[in-house]
Image (cartoon, grey):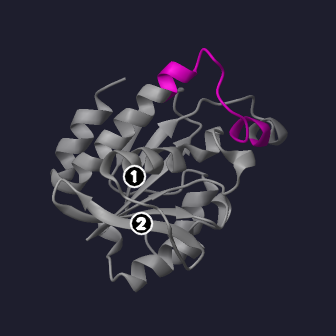
Amino acid sequence: MKMIAGLGNPGREYAGTRHNIGFDVIDRLANKYGIEINKSKFNGLFGKGTVNGEPVILVKPLTYMNLSGEAVAPLLRFFQIESSDLLIIQDDMDLPVGRIRIRAKGSSGGHNGLKSLIRHLHSEEFARIKVGIGHPPRDQQAVISHVLHGFTREEQPAIDDALDRAASAAVDWLVEPFVKVMNTYNANK
């Protein structure tokens, strides 16, 4: 069994914001594969199902972005899933809007959700799909405002495409060799 966790913030006021890219991809996967995200444990909302013959758990941490590890780590332990069978879907300000990048492991890159995961998992050894949300000016207030607001009408087609590609990459991650998935999706847009 594998786990795919999308990072975001719970609540209607955060729906559709740049920071909720992970939740948006989880919703696309759940809708496409008929997986109900309706169970709650360890401050995470999750659903179990099968995608292309592979058992999977889809997770949305309800801890808010900066505390994501507090939900994901106990769920991994409870379901006896290794961090090597975990895929995180996250927003990334250092990528242009709509670009995706897949990594097998790595540092947090300054992303607070990843910092929390690394701290609670005691490891950087988990896969991630990063979805570009673009970068505002470098002042802290602009960054907070940027990640907590939605996309412009001009950006929306690129984000819709990126969400579809991220969902496809997550499905391929379940069944394909990781290097093949990286080569396929990192080469595009």
Between 142 and 152, the one lying in front of the other is: 152
Position of residue 145 relative to residue 62, above or below, is above
Looking at the rendered structure, the kind of residue marked 1 is Ala
Residue at 42% of width from left, 26% of height from top? 161
- The residue to which callout 2 is attached is 47
Q: Quadrant of the C terminus?
A: top left
| Residue 113 image point, x, y percent | 59, 59
Q: How crowded is mark 1: few (under 14 residues within 10 Å), some or many (20 or more)?
A: many
- Judging depth in this view, the residue of 181 and 71 nearest the camera is 71
On the image, which quarter does residue 85 sit in? bottom left
Find disc 1 in the rendering and name its residue: 30
x, y (%) of residue 90?
Answer: 51, 48
Query: Magenta includes 149?
Result: yes
Q: How far apart are marks 2 and 1 (CA)?
A: 8 Å
Q: Give the range drawn in magenta.
A: 144-159
Q: Residue at x 68, y 32 (%)?
A: 150
Q: Is residue 110 above or below residue 182?
A: below
The magenta stretch spans residue 88: no
